[in-house]
Amino acid sequence: MGNMGNWFRQLGNGIKAGFFRFMDGRYGGDKLNITLVWVSFAAYIISLFIPVALVKLCLLVVYYSLLGWAIFRFLSRNTYKRYEENRKYLRFMDRLKDKEHRYFDCPRCHQPVRVPRGKGKIAITCPKCKEKFIKKT
Ligand SMILES: [Zn+2]
């Protein structure tokens, strides 16, 4: 029995080592990937309850493409680009959760500008290029 246990342990280590070798230089998981998997999974579950063929098809397309995207990102060797995508996603989520501010991109230099919410129409001056633009907050 001891031999058997050893053998299994060796097999386990071998698989683990193989996996790490396979993942070497690849991007792996991040928050964006977790979200992609969850949303794709949700689309799949909803599709099970939708009797309309066209809607079902659309949900399945969402399911496969988001899952495919997540797998692509997980295995990607372009880690810098994947990291940037995740950073943008996290920034987007931060903005979404921020109930006290609104975010605008400067029309001239695309610098993101944060302003307090609920002030009506205000003139915003871009902190970078000093461009003035009017937005409703
Ligand atoms: Zn600007």
Image (cartoon, rainbow, N blue to C red):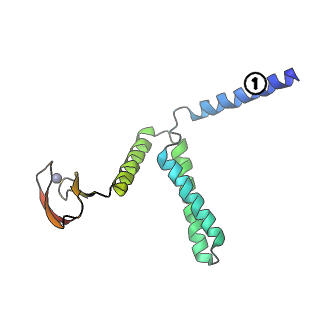
Between 71 and 47, the one lying in front of the other is 47
- Residue that appears at 60% across and 31% down: 20
Residue 2 x/y as whole percent:
86, 21
Ligand 1 within 8 Å of the CB at mark 1: no
User: On the picture, is 115 further left or further right than 38?
Assistant: left
Q: Is residue 63 above or below residue 129?
A: below
User: At 86% across and 21% down in the image, what residue appears?
Assistant: 3
Amino acid bearing label 1: Gln
Find residue 115 and report its horizontal and vertical position in percent: 21, 56
Quadrant, the C terminus: bottom left
Pick whichever, 10 or 115, lies toward us.
Answer: 115
Indicate the position of residue 87 as horizontal and vertical percent values: 38, 45
Category of crowding for the residue at label 1, using alpha-carbon neighbours closer than 10 angstroms: few (below 14), some (14–19), many (at least 20): few
Q: Tell me the quarter of the picture where residue 75 sits.
A: top right
Q: Is 51 or 20 nearer to us in this picture?
A: 51
**Residue under the image location 57 percent in, 35 percent down:** 23
| Residue pointed to by mark 1 | 10
Under circle 1, the secondary element is: helix
